[in-house]
Amino acid sequence: MKEIDAIFVVTDGLGIHREMLVIPLGPATPGRVRRLPSGKLEITVDAARPIEDWVKDLPTLIAAAPK
């Protein structure tokens, strides 16, 4: 849950509605952000990095996701 809360801090700050997010429960290596066909953002936490470090890169990952 702390990972999801950390993601929400970032996405709320960017003005992204929570209904537009898909967050898998399990992390993966590497973590990633991709846009789904539905237009939602799938945010997969990186398993190899501490969440506190990874979320610092999240705004850049979101911006790089194709629209």
Image: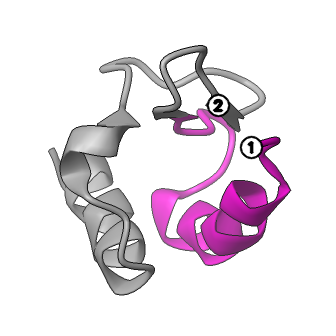
Q: Residue farthest to the bottom?
A: 13
Q: Quadrant of the N terminus?
A: top left
Give the image location of residue 39, x and y in percent. Answer: 53, 30
**Mark closer to the chain start, 1 or 2:** 2
| Residue located 62% across and 61% down the image | 54
| Residue located 64% across and 72% down the image | 59
Q: Of circles 1 and 2, which is in front?
A: 1
Give the image location of residue 37, x and y in percent. Answer: 60, 14
The residue that disc 1 covers is: 67
The residue that disc 2 covers is: 35
Q: Residues within 10 Å of mark 1 (few under 14, many from 20)?
A: few
Q: Which mark is residue 23?
A: none
Check if mark 1's residue and mark 2's residue have beta carbons within 8 Å: yes
| Residue located 32% across and 65% down the image | 6
- What secondary structure is found at the residue carrying circle 2? strand
Q: Is residue 65 above or below residue 42?
A: below
Magenta residues (range): 43-67
Q: Quadrant of residue 28?
A: top right
Q: Residue farthest to the left?
A: 1
31 on left or right of 18: right
Q: Quadrant of residue 19?
A: top left
| Residue located 37% across and 64% down the image | 16
4 on left or right of 14: left
Nearer to me, 64 or 51? 64
Report the Cα–Cα distance between label 1 and label 2.
Answer: 7 Å
Give the image location of residue 20, x and y in percent. Answer: 33, 42
Nearer to me, 65 or 45? 65
Q: Is residue 24 above or below residue 1?
A: above
Type of residue at label 2? Arg
Q: Quadrant of residue 44?
A: top right
